[in-house]
Image (cartoon, rainbow, N blue to C red):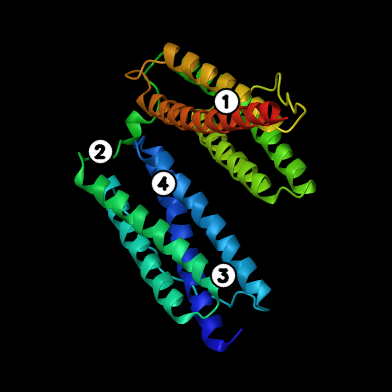
C-alpha cells in the first residue's frame, strides 16, 4: 500500500476515533438526561466502532497498522441541543474526510468501505440536524434524576426484571454467532454478533441506571440459553427471547409511573421500542426461511 493510501486510510481512522470518543460521552449524557434520542445515539456509536474495526482489518490486509495519534480536543455539549449540534458537525467532518479518501484511494475494496462510511455519517448528520430543529428537550436537573418518594422499589424491580432476559440474550445470540462462524456462515455470524452487541448495549443502559439508583443486580435465575437445532434455530430462539424481553419491559412500564420516575420510564420505553424493531427483523427473516423451505419441499 502506497504512502498516499496509508495516509488516507489513517486520516479517516483518526477522525473516526475522535468521533467515537465524542459519541461515547454524548450518548451517555443524553441517556442520563432521559433524552428520547439516547438509544439512537448509542446505536451510531456502536456502528462507528464496527466501521473502525473494518478499516483496521482493511489496512492490515495491505500490510499497514494504525499510526500514532495525538490527543484531540472534543466538542462536548452542555445541553441536549448543543450535544446534537456538535455530533452533527463531527459526522459531517467524518463524511468529508472519508469522501476525500475514497476519491484518492485506488483500491476498490477500500473505496467501497470509505463510501459506506460517507453514507452512514451523512445520514446520521441529517438525522441529528432534524432532531436539532425539532422540539427542544431540556436537560433534567439532578433533583429529577431520582424517582419521586416511594417509587424507588418499583424502578429497581422494573430494571431487574428486564435485565435478566437481556443478559441471557447476549450470551445466546453470541453463541449462535460462534456456531455460524465455525460453519463458515460468515454473514450470519456477523449479523448475530451485531445483534448481541446491540442487546448488550441495552443491558448496559439498564444496569447503569440500576446502579445509579443504588440498586444491585438480582442474582437469581440468570443464564438460561435456548440454542435449538436446525437451520432456522437462531431465528426461532431469537424471536422467542425477544418476546420474553418485550413482555418483561412492558410489565415494568405497567407498574412504573412516568411521573414518579420519568428517567427510568423513558429509558425502558426506548429499549422496548428497540426490542420491538429487533423482534420484527427476526420474524421477517424467519418468514423468509419458512417460505423457502416450503418451496423446496414442493419442488422435491
Residue 59 lies left or right of residue 17; in this view the side is right
Q: First in sequence: mark 2 or mark 1?
A: 2
Is mark 1 in CB contact (under 8 Å) with mark 4?
no
Q: In which quarter of the image is the N terminus?
A: bottom right
| CA distance for labels 1 and 4 | 22 Å
Q: Where is residue 165 in the image (x, y as percent from the top left)?
A: 62, 24
* Number of the front mark, 3 or 2: 3
Q: Residue 137 carries which label?
A: 2
The residue drawn where x is 30% and y is 36% is 140
Residue position marked by numbered label 4 in the rendering? 41
Q: Residue 242 carries which label?
A: 1
Q: First in sequence: mark 4 or mark 2?
A: 4
Establish if 3 lies above or below 214. below
Q: Where is residue 4 in the image (x, y as percent from the top left)?
A: 51, 86
Q: First in sequence: mark 3 or mark 2?
A: 3
Q: Position of residue 259 (x, y in %)?
A: 32, 19
**SS at mark 4 in the image:** helix
Q: Quadrant of the C terminus?
A: top right
| CA distance for labels 2 and 1 | 30 Å
**SS at mark 2 in the image:** loop
Report the label total: 4
Q: Residues within 10 Å of mark 3 (few under 14, many from 20)?
A: few
Establish if 58 lies above or below 31. below
The residue drawn where x is 29% and y is 46% is 80
Residue position marked by numbered label 3 in the rendering? 109
Amino acid at each position: 500500500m502506497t504512502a498516499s493510501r496509508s495516509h488516507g486510510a489513517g486520516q479517516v481512522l483518526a477522525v473516526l476515533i475522535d468521533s467515537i470518543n465524542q459519541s461515547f460521552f454524548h450518548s451517555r449524557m443524553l441517556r442520563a438526561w432521559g433524552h428520547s434520542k439516547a438509544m439512537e445515539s448509542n446505536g451510531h456509536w456502536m456502528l462507528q466502532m464496527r466501521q473502525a474495526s473494518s478499516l483496521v482489518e482493511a489496512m492490515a490486509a495491505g500490510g499497514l497498522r494504525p499510526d500514532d495519534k495525538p490527543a484531540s480536543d472534543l466538542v462536548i455539549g452542555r445541553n441536549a441541543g448543543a450535544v446534537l449540534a456538535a455530533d452533527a458537525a463531527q459526522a459531517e467532518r467524518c463524511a468529508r474526510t472519508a469522501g476525500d479518501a475514497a476519491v484518492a484511494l485506488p483500491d476498490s475494496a477500500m473505496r467501497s468501505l470509505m463510501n459506506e462510511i460517507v453514507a452512514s455519517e451523512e445520514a446520521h448528520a441529517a438525522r441529528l440536524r432534524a432532531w436539532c430543529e425539532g422540539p427542544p428537550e431540556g436537560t433534567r436537573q439532578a433533583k429529577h434524576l431520582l424517582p419521586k418518594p416511594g417509587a424507588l422499589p418499583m424502578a429497581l424491580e422494573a430494571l431487574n426484571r428486564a435485565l435478566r432476559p437481556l443478559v441471557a440474550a447476549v450470551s445466546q445470540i453470541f453463541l449462535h454467532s460462534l456456531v455460524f462462524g465455525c460453519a463458515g456462515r460468515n454473514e450470519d455470524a456477523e449479523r448475530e454478533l451485531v445483534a448481541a452487541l446491540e442487546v448488550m448495549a441495552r443491558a448496559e443502559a439498564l444496569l447503569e441506571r440500576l446502579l445509579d439508583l443504588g440498586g444491585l443486580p438480582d442474582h437469581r435465575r440468570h443464564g438460561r440459553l435456548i440454542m435449538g437445532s436446525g437451520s432456522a434455530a437462531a431465528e426461532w430462539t431469537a424471536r422467542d427471547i425477544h418476546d420474553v424481553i418485550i413482555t418483561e419491559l412492558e410489565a415494568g412500564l405497567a407498574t412504573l409511573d412516568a411521573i414518579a420516575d420519568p428517567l427510568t420510564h423513558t429509558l425502558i420505553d426506548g429499549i422496548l421500542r428497540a426490542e420491538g424493531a429487533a423482534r420484527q427483523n427476526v420474524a421477517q427473516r424467519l418468514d423468509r426461511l419458512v417460505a423457502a423451505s416450503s418451496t423446496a419441499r414442493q419442488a422435491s
